[in-house]
Image (cartoon, rainbow, N blue to C red):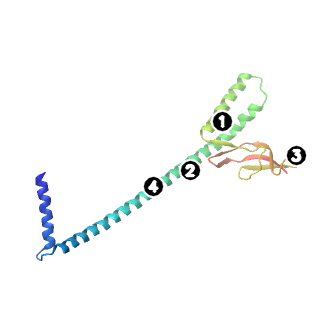
Amino acid sequence: MNKNKEIKQDEILDEENDLVGDEMLDKDEYIAKLNDDLNEQKKKTDEYFEHLKRNMAEFDNFKKRMNKEKDSMYYTITADLVSNLLPIIDNFEKALRAECKDDSYKNGMEMIYSELTGLLDKLGIEEIEALGKTFDPNFHEAVMHEEDESKGEKEVVEVFRKGYMINDRVIRHSMVKVAN
């Protein structure tokens, strides 16, 4: 270790001799030269540090953008899959409303329907509230209109087909009848 220390001291002395050269510089000039070198190295360090900060910020923005795209892709794929399942769920609801004399058959149908709706909940699929709400073309599709003074302006009075959404994105609009 002492050998390394001696070598480093020799290198420093060599550098000092190189700086001094044939002409003898006075201490003030020598210190000024060292300060200039130090300032130059500090500028380079600052440039590298700024470059590093910019790269870190760019990488952070890249990660955020990738996460946003991943989430968007997840919701798009989930919405596509669920939109193909919705007619099956609609048919289960029709079957459950139909009269059935076989209780075990009806219980089986209810269990399957319950599993399907549980899957929708797990995927983050929400049913669009429609009945009694004010008609909103962003969520509802009006297929009928009726005049009824006992109902409010643009109030949904009947739902023909349920609507669903995921993460504030409509998968299927509710098909409704609107009053007034």
Of label 2 and label 3, which has the lower sequence position?
Answer: 2
Distance from disc 1 to disc 4, alpha carbons, whole Å, reads 38 Å
**Depth-wise, is mark 2 or mark 4 nearer the camera?**
4
Which quadrant of the structure image shows residue 110?
top right
Of label 1 and label 4, which has the lower sequence position?
Answer: 4
Which residue is under mark 4?
60
Q: Nearer the viewer, residue 132 or 83?
A: 132
Residue type, label 1: Thr
* Residue at (65, 44) in percent of width and height: 83
* Residue at (21, 71) in percent of width and height: 31
Distance from disc 2 to disc 4, alpha carbons, whole Å, reads 18 Å
**Depth-wise, is mark 1 or mark 3 nearer the camera?**
3
Mark identifier at residue 117: 1
Give SS at disc 4. Answer: helix
Mark 1, residues whose alpha carbon is within 10 Å: few (<14), some, or many (≥20)? some
Mark 4, residues whose alpha carbon is within 10 Å: few (<14), some, or many (≥20)? few
Which residue is under mark 2?
72
Residue type, label 3: Ser
**Depth-wise, is mark 1 or mark 4 nearer the camera?**
4
Q: Are marks 2 and 3 in contact (CB under 8 Å)?
A: no
Q: Nearer the viewer, residue 127 or 43?
A: 43
Is residue 78 depicted above or below 46 in this figure?
A: above
Left or right of 27: which side holds 145? Answer: right
**Depth-wise, is mark 2 or mark 3 nearer the camera?**
3
Distance from disc 2 to disc 1, alpha carbons, whole Å, reads 23 Å
Residue type, label 4: Asp
Mark 2, residues whose alpha carbon is within 10 Å: few (<14), some, or many (≥20)? few
Give SS at disc 1. Answer: helix
Q: Are marks 2 and 4 in contact (CB under 8 Å)?
A: no
Left or right of 156: which side holds 18? Answer: left
